[in-house]
Amino acid sequence: HSGEYVSQVSVASNVVTITFGSGVHNGNTITLTATDQGGSISWACASATISDNQLPTICTGI
């Protein structure tokens, strides 16, 4: 999948990896990791290439 700002989305097991294709984060990735919490799922958002204070708004509140 891709769009205006995303060049690739990949899913492996419980991890969704999003690669940005334009803008300030071009080429950088974020990962959304799902964890089973005994009947519900929690998500963690992280990036090795984007500092925490510059993570996209989709990572806030996760």
Image: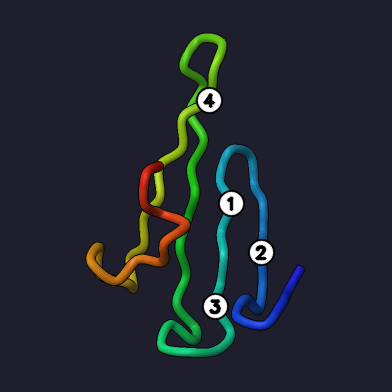
The reply to whether discs 2 and 1 touch (Cβ–Cβ < 8 Å) is: yes
Q: Which mark is residue 20?
A: 3
User: In the image, is 19 to the left or to the right of 28?
Assistant: right
Of the numbered discs 4 and 2, the one sitting upstream in the chain is 2
Q: CA distance from mark 4 to mark 3?
A: 25 Å
Q: Secondary structure at mark 3?
A: strand
Q: Which residue is mark 1?
A: 16
For badge 1, the amino acid type reads Val
What residue lies at 58% left-to-right and 84% top-to-bottom?
Answer: 21
Where, quadrant-wise, is the C terminus in this rendering? Answer: top left
Q: Which residue is mark 4?
A: 41
28 w.r.t. 41: above or below: below
User: In the image, is 36 to the left or to the right of 53?
Assistant: right
Of the numbered discs 1 and 4, the one sitting upstream in the chain is 1
Q: Residues within 10 Å of mark 3 (few under 14, many from 20)?
A: many
What residue lies at 73% left-to-right and 74% top-to-bottom?
Answer: 2
How far across and down, in percent of the image, does residue 12 sit? 65, 47
Q: Which residue is mark 2?
A: 9
Q: CA distance from mark 1 to mark 4?
A: 14 Å
Q: Secondary structure at mark 4?
A: strand
How far across and down, in percent of the image, does residue 20 sit? 54, 77
The reply to whether discs 4 and 3 touch (Cβ–Cβ < 8 Å) is: no
For badge 3, the amino acid type reads Phe
What residue lies at 50% left-to-right and 10% top-to-bottom?
Answer: 38
The reply to whether discs 3 and 1 touch (Cβ–Cβ < 8 Å) is: no
Q: Residues within 10 Å of mark 2 (few under 14, many from 20)?
A: some
Of the numbered discs 3 and 2, the one sitting upstream in the chain is 2
For badge 2, the amino acid type reads Val
